[in-house]
Each structure stands twice: as structure tokens, then as C-alpha cells.
């Protein structure tokens, strides 16, 4: 059958029977020996200072293997590159770890992670982490963000 004959013709998909009957395997269905689960605590603010993070209750929750904040990863995990003005990377600007340190700069910025035996334990322990935020002004309009008195996400810039 040529390509021209196939155009406009229905093609039977091989995966449909598995999907329709619920027999398909998804990534979420995979269970490996010794597998752990991670839950990420994300910022509810678009811009805020992190005054403190208390992870004691999460660390002591049964089934939790580890809880990490930016302080825990300092010097252990490398930095995540971020966009910075040309020439500023050499000055140390644009350095950002995988977890927010001292300040969150967008809604959903990762603040802490919990590693646990199963997904439910990880989520429950994540919810036990207490973060003291000091909300800061945020700008959601590009024109207003360019004004001289606009709040700064990165003071170094």
C-alpha cells in the first residue's frame, strides 16, 4: 500500500486494546525492588523571603528516608543554570541550586524534598514541613517589571 493510498484511511492502532482494557503499563505502575518516592514542597508565593524551614516532623515521620533543603545540598549537589545577562556568569551571578535558598522567585519554586518508602508517606511528610515565608512584592506585568522601582528577583543584576 503506497503513502497516497494511506492518506485519509483509518489506521488501526496496536496499543488501543491494552489501553481500553486497562492492561497497559504506565511509568507510574512500575515498581522496582528498593524503589523510593519523592515529594517536592513548592512555594505558594511568587516572591518571598524564606525566614526558616522546620523539617523535624517530616524527618521523624515513619517511612521517611531523607528530607533535603538547600542547606542540606550545599556543596553536595551542583547548580542549575539560569538565564542571566551576558557576561555576568563569570561574576558568579546566575548560580541557583536545585532548591530555593533564602528566597523563592516564582510560584512553585522547589523549597524542600522528601524521600520515602512510598508516595503517600512522602506526600504526608512533605505536608509536615513548616516554612516561614515573608511575602515580597511581585510583578506579573512585563511593562511594570521594567520600571526602576519594580521589585527585584535577583538583586545582583
Image (cartoon, rainbow, N blue to C red):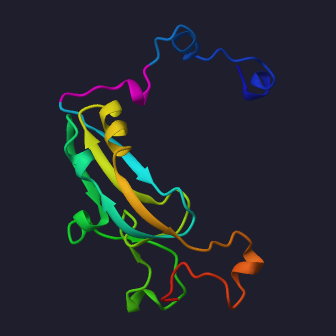
- Residue 6 figure quarter: top right
77 with respect to 120 (left or right):
left
Residue at 41%, 63% (x, y): give it. 132
Seen as rendered, the residue at the extreme right is 8
Quadrant of res 142: bottom right
**Above/below status of 82 relative to 90:** above
Residue 103, horizontal then vertical, whole percent: 44, 72
Residue drawn at point x = 35 percent, y = 56 percent: 112
User: For this view, does 33 lie left or right of residue 78?
Assistant: left
Q: Which residues are magenta?
A: 25-33
Q: Looking at the picture, how far across and down is residue 100, in whole percent?
A: 40, 66
- Residue 74, above or below 9: below
Residue 76 at what x, y percent from top left?
A: 20, 66
Prevailing secondary structure class for the magenta stretch in the rendered image: loop
Residue drawn at x 55%, y 61% is 45
Q: Is residue 44 above or below residue 122?
A: below
Question: Is residue 113 placed above or below 35 in the rendered structure?
Answer: below
Judged left or right of residue 29, residue 33 is: left
Based on the picture, tell me whether residue 30 belongs to the magenta stretch.
yes
Q: Classify residue 115 by image quadrant.
A: top left
19 or 143: nearer the viewer: 143
Is residue 105 magenta-colored?
A: no
Residue 18 vs residue 94, the one in the foreground: 94
Between 124 and 30, the one nearer to me in the picture: 124
Quadrant where the N terminus sits is top right
The residue drawn where x is 48% and y is 60% is 109
Q: Can you give x and y, in whole percent of width and height, for residue 105 in the image?
A: 52, 69
Amino acid at each position: 500500500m503506497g503513502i497516497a493510498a494511506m492518506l485519509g484511511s483509518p489506521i488501526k492502532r496496536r496499543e488501543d486494546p491494552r489501553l481500553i482494557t486497562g492492561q497497559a503499563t504506565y511509568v507510574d505502575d512500575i515498581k522496582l525492588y528498593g524503589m523510593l518516592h519523592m515529594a517536592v514542597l513548592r512555594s505558594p508565593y511568587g516572591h518571598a523571603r524564606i525566614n526558616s524551614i522546620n523539617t523535624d516532623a517530616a524527618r521523624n515521620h515513619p517511612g521517611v528516608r531523607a528530607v533535603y533543603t538547600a542547606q542540606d545540598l550545599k556543596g553536595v549537589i551542583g547548580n542549575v543554570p539560569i538565564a542571566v545577562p551576558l557576561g555576568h556568569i563569570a561574576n558568579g551571578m546566575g548560580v541557583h541550586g536545585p532548591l530555593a535558598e533564602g528566597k523563592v522567585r516564582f510560584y512553585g519554586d522547589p523549597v524542600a524534598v522528601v524521600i520515602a518508602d512510598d508516595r503517600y508517606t512522602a506526600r504526608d511528610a512533605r505536608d509536615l514541613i513548616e516554612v516561614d515565608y515573608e511575602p515580597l512584592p511581585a510583578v506579573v506585568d512585563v511593562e511594570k517589571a521594567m520600571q526602576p522601582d519594580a521589585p527585584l528577583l535577583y538583586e545582583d543584576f
